[in-house]
Amino acid sequence: MAFRKLLGSAVALTFISAGLGADLDGSRYLWYDTPASQFNASLPVGNGRLGGTLYCLPTEIVTWNEDSVWGSTFQDRVNPKSLKSFPVIRDLLVGGNVSAAGNLALTDMTGISIDPSAYQVLSNLYIDLGQRDEAKNLLRYLDTLEGYTACEYDYDGVGYKRELIASSPSGVLGLRINATTPGTINLSAHLQRSKYVEANYATVANGVNSIVLKATTGEDNYNTFTAEVRIVADKGNVTTSEGKLFVSGATTVDFFFDAESSYRYTSASDQEAELKRKLNAATDLGYDALKEEAVKDHKSLAERVRLDLGASAGDAASLPTNERQINYRSSPDNDVEFATLLFNYGRHLLIASSRSIGDLALPPGLQGIWNQDYSPSWGGKYTVNINLQMNYWPAETTNLNELTSPLWRLLTLVQQRGEDVAEKMYGCPGFVLHHNTDLWGDAVPVDNGTSYSIWPMGGAWLSLHMMDHYRFTGDRTFLAEKAYPIFKSAFDFFDCYLFDLDDYLTTGPSCSPELAYKIPSGMATEGQEEGLTFSPTLDNSILFELFTALNETHSILGINDSFASKVKKQLGKLRPPQIGSKGQILEWIEEFTSTDEGHRHFSPLFGLFPGTQLTPLASPELASAAGVLFDDRMDNGGGSTGWSRAWSIALNARLYKGASAWENVKAWLQTFLLTNLWNSDHGGSTVFQIDGNLGYTAAISEMLLQSHLGVVHLLPALPSSIPAGSVTGLVGRGGFEVGVSWKDGSLTKATVKSLLGNELTLLVNGGNSFRVDGTEYQGPITTKKGETYTITIQ
Ligand SMILES: *[C@@H]1O[C@H](CO)[C@@H](O)[C@H](O)[C@H]1NC(C)=O
Ligand SMILES: *[C@@H]1O[C@H](CO)[C@@H](O)[C@H](O)[C@H]1NC(C)=O
Ligand SMILES: *[C@@H]1O[C@H](CO)[C@@H](O)[C@H](O)[C@H]1NC(C)=O
Ligand SMILES: *[C@@H]1O[C@H](CO)[C@@H](O)[C@H](O)[C@H]1NC(C)=O
Ligand SMILES: *[C@@H]1O[C@H](CO)[C@@H](O)[C@H](O)[C@H]1NC(C)=O
Ligand SMILES: *[C@@H]1O[C@H](CO)[C@@H](O)[C@H](O)[C@H]1NC(C)=O
Ligand SMILES: *[C@@H]1O[C@H](CO)[C@@H](O)[C@H](O)[C@H]1NC(C)=O
Ligand SMILES: *[C@@H]1O[C@H](CO)[C@@H](O)[C@H](O)[C@H]1NC(C)=O
C-alpha cells in the first residue's frame, strides 16, 4: 500500500481528510489519532548519537538524549581484597562450601561501590503554541523506512504539521512546525532540565536565535554538556524573555538541535566549537535539505531488507497502531502485518541508535538512546549477560553490518579496562568483563549478588560478535587488526584463570546468569539457595565458541605458531554439554534443583542460539536435549520478559520448529509492547528495554534464513500460519545476500547473491531437494563474487 499524499491539493484548507492514517502502509508506519500522553507513547527518531521523541501534545515536548550523557566519570571500583580471596573462594566452591564461598565473594570480589555510571536524560524542549484546546483531525505517525516522525492536525481552522527528523550525516536533529495559513504561528520555546543545570538562556543576536542549556551530570561536576537549539522562523518576529524564545507571526518555524558532552573532547573550547560547527552547518543547509539528507541516509539502510509475511485480514492493518495492538491480543491471526511492522521497527531502532561517528561512537544501552529519567532502571547500562548482545543480533543478518562499529569501539575500551581488572582481581593477563559495563568500559563486577555479579564471561561473549562480523563480511583487515588482538586478550585471561577439574578446563567462581539453585544434600548449607558455582553450561559454551573462533582465525590468517597450537589443545579440554535425567541440557555442572524452573534467561541454551554447539547441524542429540530444556522452561512460565520471549523465537527457529516460533512471535506481540511498540521488560510492566525489539527482528530473520556452521539454510523454520510471503536482502555468513519467496509453505524461488565469492553450501526447508540455476543441487557449489544464483524446487 502506498503512502498517500499527505497534503492533498494545495487549495485544501486542512491537511487531513477523513480516514486519517487508514491509507498508511500498516507494515511500515506506526500511527495514532491521539497525542502521546506518556513517553512510552511518543515516537522515537535518532542519528545514532542524538535521540528524540515527539508527542504532539498541545504543548509539544521533544524529549531528547545524547548518548554520552551518563552520571559519572570513570570510577576504579576494583575490590583490593579480590586477588587474595579469589583462590580461597574457588577452593570453598570446589569443596562444596558454597554459601561460605558466596559470602566471601560478596565482600571481597564485588566492586567497592556496586554500580558503574548510569545513563541520563539530556533535556526536554517545550514548545507552547498557545493551543489550549484539543486539536482536530490529529494524525501522528512514524515512518520506519524513512526514519522520521510527524503529526498533523487542525486547530482553530488552521492546519498544522510538526515533524522531527534525525540526520546522521549532519549529526543533528531537526524539527519543523508549519501552518497552512500564513503568519499564524506564535510560540514560545524553552529547554528544561531538573538537575545540575548551570546555565539556561535564550538569545537573539545577529540573526541567530538560540536556546542554550549547560549542565553537568552530577553534583561532583561529572560530565559537562552544552545543548543548543537554533530556531529559524520564515517570517514574523523572534524575541526572548526569561530564558524563553518567542516567535510570533510565522508560517514555518524550524529547530536544529545539537548537544556535545565533555566525554568526547579534551577541552571545553573544542566541545563548544564542534557544537557551533554542527549547528551552523545544519542551519546553512536548511530544513528541507537536512530532511532530504536524513531520509536518504536512513532509507539507504532500511530499504535493504523487504519483508512480506502476507496481508492482514480486511482492514485490520488500517487501524491506528494502538487499536491494532489491542485487537492483536484477541485476534492475532487477523493482523500478520503487525508482525512485519515490528520487524521493520526493530531495524529502524537499530539504525537510529547505533551509527559510526568516528572513533568515539557508543552502542545503544538497555533503552537504546531514548530515556527520560535521571536514574533509569538498571542505570540504562550495557548489560552483557544477554542484553547488549541481543541489541546487535539483527545487525549482520538484516544487512546492517556497518552499524556494529560502536560495539567494536566499546569492546576496545572494555579490553583496556578489563586488562587492568584481570590483573588486579585475578592476577591474570588478558582482559575480563563481568555482567555490565558503561561508557568508560568499566569491567568490575556490578551489583552485589551471587547469582549475577561474579561472572567473568561478558568480554568473551561480546568478542564472538567480532568473529561473526568477519564471517558475514569477509573483512580480513578487521579480523587481523581489530578482532584478533581482542580474541587473544580474551584467551590469555582464560588460559591463566581456568583451572583443571576432572581433566576439564573449569571456570569459577561464576554463575548461570541470574539463576540460583538449591544446595544439594550432603553439601554444607544443604537446601539453601545460592547462585555461585563453577563451570555452568553457559561458560563452557562461550569458551567453546571463543576458542573455535580463535582456531578459525588462525586458519584464515595462516597463523600456525605455538599460540595457535595451544588454542587447539585447550579447545579439546573444554567440558562438553551434559544431558540430565529428563533428557534435558543441564544448566550447571551437576543436576541441581533450580529455584525458578521458568527462568527468563535461557543461558544453558546459548549453544542453540546465538551459539552453534547445540544446533541440529552440530548434534541432533544435543539439539533434542536443548528442546527438552526449552519446553520445560516454557511449561514453567519461561519467556516472561520481552527479551526472553524474543530469544525463545530464535531458539525455536534453530530447532526448525516454525509453529512454536510463531506462537512465541504472537505471545511477544500480545504481551510485551508499550504504546509506541517499545519492548517492555515484563508483560504489564512499564519499563522500556530495547533488546526485545531488536531480538525480535533478529529472530524473525532466523526463521527465514540461517547460516551457521557453513550452511546457508533457506526457510529453516517457516510456520504454516504464514503460508505465503517473501523476503529480500537478508544476509548469510560467507557473504550471501538472500531473497526468498514461498507459497503453500514451501519455497517457490530464491536468489543468492555471492558477495565474496565463497563456496556455497545450501539447505532448503530442512532437506528438500532443489535446483540451482536449473541444475539439481548435489553439494557445495563454487560461486563467483557478484553473481546471483537462482534456487527453485522443480
Ligand atoms: C555486598 O554485600 C556484602 C554482603 O551483604 C556486604 O558485606 C558488602 O558491603 C556489600 N558491598 C557493597 C559495596 O555494598
Ligand atoms: C510543511 O513542511 C513540510 C515539510 O516538513 C512540507 O512538506 C509542507 O509542504 C509544509 N506545509 C506548508 C503548509 O508549508
Ligand atoms: C500572535 O501574536 C500576535 C501578537 O504578537 C497577535 O496579534 C496574534 O493574534 C497572535 N496569533 C495567534 C494565532 O494567536
Ligand atoms: C513584529 O515587531 C514589529 C516591531 O516591534 C511590530 O510592528 C510587528 O507588528 C510585529 N509583528 C508581529 C507579527 O508580531
Ligand atoms: C564453610 O566455610 C566457612 C568459612 O570458611 C567455615 O566457617 C565453615 O566451617 C565451612 N563449613 C563446612 C561444612 O566446611
Ligand atoms: C581448527 O581449525 C582447523 C583448520 O580450520 C580445523 O581443521 C580443525 O578442525 C579445527 N579444530 C577444531 C577442534 O575445531
Ligand atoms: C602447524 O605446525 C605444526 C608443527 O609446527 C605442523 O605439524 C602442522 O602441520 C602445521 N599445520 C598447518 C595447518 O600448517
Ligand atoms: C506508560 O508509562 C506510564 C507512566 O510510567 C504508565 O502509567 C503506563 O502504564 C505505561 N503504558 C504502558 C502501555 O505500559
Image (cartoon, rainbow, N blue to C red):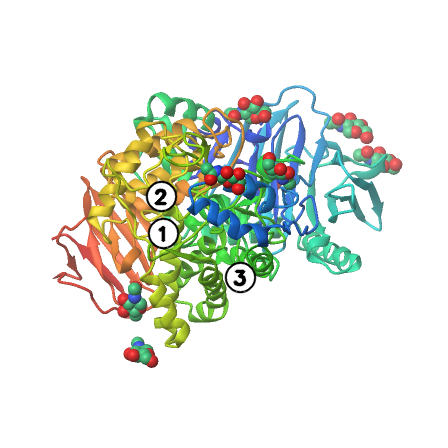
Asked if the residue under mark 3 is in contact with the one under mark 1, i.e. CB atoms within 8 Å, the reply is no
Relative vertical location of residue 618 with respect to residue 215 in this rendering, above or below = below
- Counting from the top left corner in percent of width and height, residue 576 is at 30, 52
Q: Which residue is mark 3?
A: 428
CA gap, disc 1 and disc 3: 21 Å
Q: Quick one: SS at disc 1?
A: helix
Q: Which residue is mark 2?
A: 604
Q: Which residue is mark 1?
A: 541
- Please report the residue visible at 45 percent of the width from the left and 33 percent of the height from the top: 525
Which corner quadrant holds the N terminus? top left
Which amino acid is tagged 3? Cys
The answer to whether residue 452 is seen in the rendering is no
Which amino acid is tagged 2? Pro
Relative vertical location of residue 115 with respect to residue 317 in this rendering, above or below = below
Of residue 552 and residue 565, the one placed in the foreground of this image is: 565
- Counting from the top left corner in percent of width and height, residue 717 is at 25, 43
Quarter of the image where ligand 4 sits: top right
Name the side, left or right, on which 688 lies relative to 332. Answer: right
CA gap, disc 2 and disc 1: 8 Å
